[in-house]
Amino acid sequence: MRAFYYDNSSLDQRELHDSGKEVSQDYLAQIGVLYWRLEGENAMERLNGIAQERSYKNRDEIVVSPQAMGDIYETKVKTFFDEHLHEDEEIRYILDGSGFFDVRSRDDEWIRIRVEKGDMLVLPAGIYHRFTTDTNNYIKAMRLFKDDPVWTPINRPLADDNTYRQAYVQSMAAH
């Protein structure tokens, strides 16, 4: 995992967009973004431990690539890149490939988080974010859920008054 401020250039969303300004894992934790590096022979054991500690009861796998998705790939990648939030945590463990999660900083700037095989990322409920593959156009991820698998995005600005958004903003003001 590597995090940095997004450069806001007009390049394709799958390009690196590295502004050259790094973001620390500590800062990500301050805005509620959690990260683990899980690799090696005990990776699944560690994943299962985290899942148990955090009450993740369900999981599935998703492959985002032209081969897996066919003609809808480009449309789906653009949809995933729409700024949105969820009313529950977004938990992803990268099984293969690579991509980017962008999250909003305290100052409403985009932070780009590059993830690859072995990275596990948890985005808190209520944080504005978006996702895209990188120029390799391939990522395979395990999605973990506290309850039944649900992926319901609420796009900005419609989500500004959402209860989970307000709770997130309030929790950030307290820090």
Image: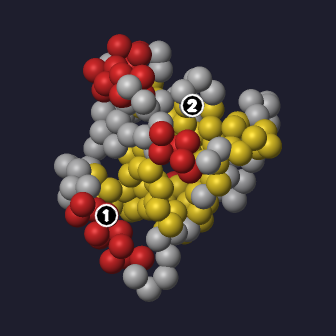
Residue drawn at x 49%, y 82% as measured from the top left: 40
Residue 133 in view, yes or no: no
Q: Are marks 1 and 2 in contact (CB under 8 Å)?
A: no
Numbered tag placed on residue 105 in the rendering: 2
In the image, residue 89 above or below residue 104? below
Q: Which of the two discs, 1 and 2, labels the residue nearer the N terminus? A: 1
Numbered tag placed on residue 50 in the rendering: 1
In the image, residue 140 above or below residue 30? below
Of residues 173 and 112, the one nearer the viewer is 173
In the image, residue 27 above or below residue 107? below
The amino acid pointed to by label 2 is Ser
**What is the total number of numbered labels drawn onto the structure image?**
2
Please identify the quadrant where the C terminus is shown.
Answer: top left
Q: CA distance from mark 1 to mark 2?
A: 25 Å
Give coordinates of residue 111: x percent, y percent: 62, 38
In the image, residue 175 above or below residue 32? above
Q: Quadrant of residue 4?
A: top right
Give coordinates of residue 13: x percent, y percent: 69, 39
Residue drawn at x 76%, y 34% as measured from the top left: 7
Residue 45 in view, yes or no: yes
Which class describes the residues within 10 Å of circle 1: few (<14), some (14-19), or many (20+)? few
Of residues 159 and 123, the one nearer the viewer is 123
Q: Quadrant of residue 17?
A: top right
Residue drawn at x 75%, y 41% as measured from the top left: 21
| Outermost residue to the bottom | 41
| Outermost residue to the front | 175
Please identify the quadrant where the N terminus is shown.
Answer: bottom right
Tell whether 73 sits left or right of 125.
right
The amino acid pointed to by label 1 is Ile
